[in-house]
Image (spheres, helix red, strand yellow):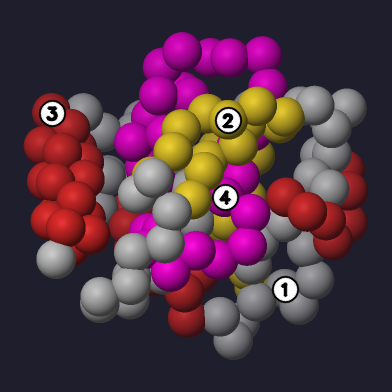
Amino acid sequence: MNRLINRFKITALTLSFLSTSTLAADLTLYKSPYCGCCSAWAEHVKEAGVNVTIIEQADNNELRKTHGIKAELASCHTAKIGKYIIEGHVPVADIQRMLRDKPEIEGLTVPGMPASSPGMDVVGNVDPYQVIAFDRNGKTRVFSQYNQ
């Protein structure tokens, strides 16, 4: 029950933040044509007012390699927004913070596919996960944490 309450609090906080702020940049999403969770994540981003262009392709490995995304940081989709790369189910609030603060990073990732991340919503399942900032040389740091 506490997990459900925490999930509700995070969702309410995110929605209140989204109501006062939207992303100004366009996002290009590279995903498999067969991945439903990637499409659900795209809807999460669109709800923040972002124009999302979807490019369906079977393999993002070359794109990941170009931007320094190691295998342990990979997820099911890759996106570009402004000068940054987004890998996986990164919450909109973190993308907004990155675009606002303009850190010297290559991008953000949520490695794997945590059940409680945006687009991976599973009722009753609240996995803890981290959003990781990474640079082109493979250096990483925790950008934010959820459901800890």
- Residue annotated with mark 4: 110
**With respect to residue 13, does 4 lie above or below?**
below
Q: Disc 1 vs disc 4: Cβ atoms closer than 8 Å? A: no
- Return the x and y of residue 118 as percentages of the image width and height: 37, 59
Q: Secondary structure at mark 4?
A: strand
- Residue annotated with mark 2: 142
Amino acid type, label 4: Val
Q: Dot 4: within a 10 Å radius of its alpha carbon, few (fewer than 14), some, or many (20 or more) residues? A: many
Give whichever of discs 2 and 1 has the lower sequence position: 1
Depth check: 5 or 74 in front?
5
Q: Secondary structure at mark 1?
A: loop
Amino acid type, label 1: Gln
User: For the point 14% across and 66% down, which residue is it?
Assistant: 1
Depth check: 109 or 21 in front?
109
Q: Where on the picture, by quarter, is residue 14?
A: top left
Is residue 3 magenta-colored?
no
User: For the point 84% across and 32% down, which residue is it?
Assistant: 138
Q: Which residues are magenta?
A: 91-119
Q: Nearer the viewer, mark 2 or mark 4?
A: 2
User: For the point 35% across and 49% down, which residue is it?
Assistant: 147
- Residue annotated with mark 1: 57
Give whichever of discs 1 and 4 has the lower sequence position: 1
